[in-house]
Amino acid sequence: MLESLLVVLLIAAVAWIGSCIGLTAVFGIVLPYVAVLVFIIGLVKRMIYWAKSPVPFAIPTTGGQERSLDFIPYAKLDCPSSKFGVFVRMVLEVCCFRSLFRNTQACTFENDPVNGGARVVYYSSKWLWFFSLLFHYCFLIVFLRHFRFFMEPVPSCIGIIEAVDGVLQIGAPRFFLTGGLLLCALLFLLARRIFDQRLRYISLANDYFPLFLLIGIVLSGICLRYFDKAEIAQVKIFIMGLTHFSPVISGLDLNGMFIVHLTLVCTLLIYFPYSKLVHMPGIFFSPTRNLPTNTREVRHVNPWNPPKQFFTYPEYEDTYRDAMAAAGLPLEKQPEKKPTE
Amino acid sequence: MAKLPSPKDLLASRPDFPAESWLDTKPEFAPGSYCYPEKKETMELLHMPNPHDWDPSAEDWNLPDDWEKILCDAFADRLAKHRSLKLFMDICVRCGACADKCHFFLGTNDPKNMPVLRAELLRSLYRRDYTKLGKILGKKVGARGWDKNVVKELFYYAYQCTECRRCSLFCPYGIDTAEITAIVRELMHEVGLGTHWIMDPVKNCSFTGNHLGIKPHSFKEIVEMLADDCETVTGIRPKTPFNEKGHEILFITPSGDVFADPGIYTFMGYLLLFHELDLDYTLSTYASEGGNFGSFTTFNMAKKLNAKMYAEAERLGSKWILGGECGHMWRVVNQYMATYNGPSPSHMTVPKSPITGTVFKNAAATKMVHITEFTADLIRHGKLNLDPSRNDHIITTFHDSCNPARAMGLLEEPRYILKHVCNHFVEMPENTIREQTFCCGAGSGLNTEEIMELRMRSGMPRGNALRYVQQKYGVNHMACVCAIDRATLPPLANYWAPGVNVSGLHELVANALVMKGEPKRTMDLRQEDLPGVEDDAEGGEDQ
């Protein structure tokens, strides 16, 4: 855990120092282009890598009643038998984290009066679902808000998002809710890794690093907006330069914190395709969710299905013919009559 | 078998998490925590790779010399064959939602029984060979190389997972531990590691047609004895057609039901039901196994054992197959059979109930119908004369088997039947039934005696839920639709909720079934008095 934190701090420090010693071109131009390339190529390669392996079997996890008899209503969302049903199931999974919504927490009570002994109770536990959803949606909105820097003129929908996001009308510049909530969600996700014994036990550096990285990005972002403020006009010129492939950086007043923010974002982009963060495209490939539960109705074909090799009936009858005849079982071939003495 | 601790002691003896990282702990092969190894001859007979003698509790497992290369190559091969494996290795975020969904974890508190860590055991090897960060940073990012202790660990935990898929229901990405466990077991088989309790039935099924190795003449004899018992109870001797050509339906059920108490009563239930319907069907001694222990071994072994079903339907000219109550059998039939051994023989037709005319469109390709779908449809159409009061002495609950629940969605059919054959039906707590059902603790080939304590631990969530309804509602019976359940739930109930009986669904159906021309029934299929019989007898004497 500490190592992950140190690595993030180190990256931030290097970016800060870099900006101080005049390496802004490296952190501001070279790194972003490299990061975006690595992100896109890495993700595409990862998806091709997955797609290269076939789906030999249809193994949807059924989360409800199958479609069988007419008088039994079936679970269209959790046990979809059509492609459209699967589409809806996937939309709910991706947009609402439906599986996580089911989450429960098992508690064992040693002396339960009903059971006259131990009793396990499964409580609904929606915290993880709530904060994950909060994190992902806030991140999405923050991401969309940043299109203000990428587009000229700024699309009106971004203005609307900003208006809603700043609805509390606190401070100047106006406090964006999503920034704060994003930080809260990240801190919750980090706290459960640290304070929940089970989570602590399974967590690796690969789990802490993206959390610290994201916290770093959010903190530096908040800092740029409210405290160590960036020159918005200058940032926009710089970003527009990048997106139009005619980068300008010399002469622009970009503060160190901005370079830190940018560098951390670039780190995230580079890290993304080589980490667990590939769950983003991965969920769409998941065979327990993205296949219809019509496996008896439509045959799923396995491209590497090996040839059939089994103990055939003729072999079976050859092995047991006499006993089968004696038991009066029907036979394909009658046993040879033994010569009678 | 060692004496079991009391339920209280068993719960209290769950150890805390170890202080050191999971990368530094090793499993302890204490008696009772592992299944006995398979016999070398069995593996040779089945042409499994690298058969050898070994002992799980020994330091040296006599692995083949080039074991590491075999395993690395096999892992690469499986990654190339299964997109699911690549994906499940890559996308886990270790959110921990799966942790307390696993019955093995709840019962043992062993962190490596959290589905996430069970998968991490394999993922750690994947990271070293298939991810850049793992290659560079190694253990820091949870990557490690193969060594013999890792092999032991994989074996240990692959056989402490019943492939029940409960975790996959809760996983936000649908990561299916059953898939990972199945592949780890395949890898273990590459270096000749398997368990006797699984491989012996596989061998039997390969050469006699069923797990128990019942030969054709004995199979017929046993079924006829069961038909005799049916006659004792009902006064009607059901027909027992075997290997007969030209019948519309081929009936296949797990062989455990012709052999083991209380499965035999379920089998008698089938015979009586089919007789009452005058169903045009046959049994087969060749395809006399619905279950498939091959599915606990390798995908190809599952395919091999399953192949007999279509082959026999083709030979006998059956139009469709009716399948009995079984859990993993239906995982295979519902999700794998058509893929493994389809398309179905060309003369087979979309299943249609000859009694009600209902077409089972949901089985259009596989041509195999679950008996509860068949019976629920009969009841719906009023084709069965049922007297549920014959089951009035029981207050029953229903155990959803993992595979029909989470790999098929068979939830309402058995309940519909149960409600029509029993007047007293109580559900267990909602987070322990239907798609959230807990495993009996001994599925996927772990229903062996030598790990009884482990089974009681992994069966704790199920046993505990059963105890709750027993104490609260007076439940004294648990119905199920799985042959392994019928073998594993009685000891589980006996341990966690003594006094609860276990039976298949069709035992209860046959008990309630009023057959044409039957004399007044006084006994149930177990030849125990029906409720009210004694009163009647006394009343008769008075008169």
Image (cartoon, rainbow, N blue to C red):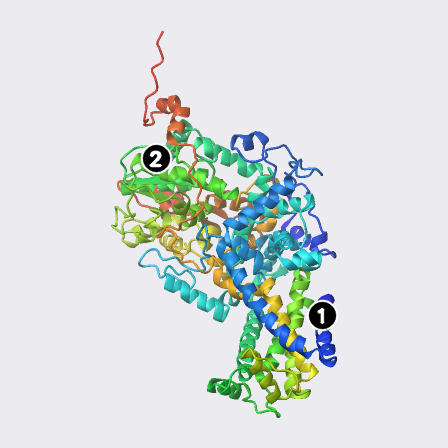
In terms of secondary structure, where does tag 2 sit?
A: helix
Q: Is residue A203 above or below residue A176?
A: above
Front residue of B542/B336: it is: B336
Q: Residue at x 72, y 78 (%)?
A: A16
Q: Is residue B432 above or below residue B503?
A: below
In terms of secondary structure, where does tag 1 sit?
A: helix
Front residue of A214/B358: it is: A214
Front residue of B395/B136: it is: B136
Q: Chain of mark 2?
A: B
Q: Horizontal and vertical percent for residue A245?
A: 55, 77
Q: Is residue A114 visible?
A: no
Q: Which residue is mark 2?
A: B231
Q: Residue at x 25, y 46 (%)?
A: B354
Mark 1 to mark 2 CA distance (whole Å): 76 Å
Q: Is residue B42 visible?
A: yes
Dot 2 amino acid type: Glu
Quadrant containing the N terminus of chain A is bottom right
Q: Chain of mark 1?
A: A
Q: Which residue is mark 1?
A: A5
Q: Is residue A213 above or below residue B163?
A: below
Q: Horizontal and vertical percent for residue B267?
A: 40, 40
- A178 to the left or right of B28: left
The numbered disc on residue A315 is none
Q: Horizontal and vertical percent for residue A273?
A: 58, 64
Report which quarter residue A109 is drawn in.
bottom right
Dot 1 amino acid type: Leu
Q: Residue at x 34, y 50 (%)?
A: B363
**Closer to viewer: mark 1 or mark 2:** 1
- A19 to the left or right of A113: right
Q: Residues within 10 Å of mark 1 (few under 14, many from 20)?
A: some
Q: Horizontal and vertical percent for residue B17?
A: 70, 57
Quadrant containing the C terminus of chain A is top left
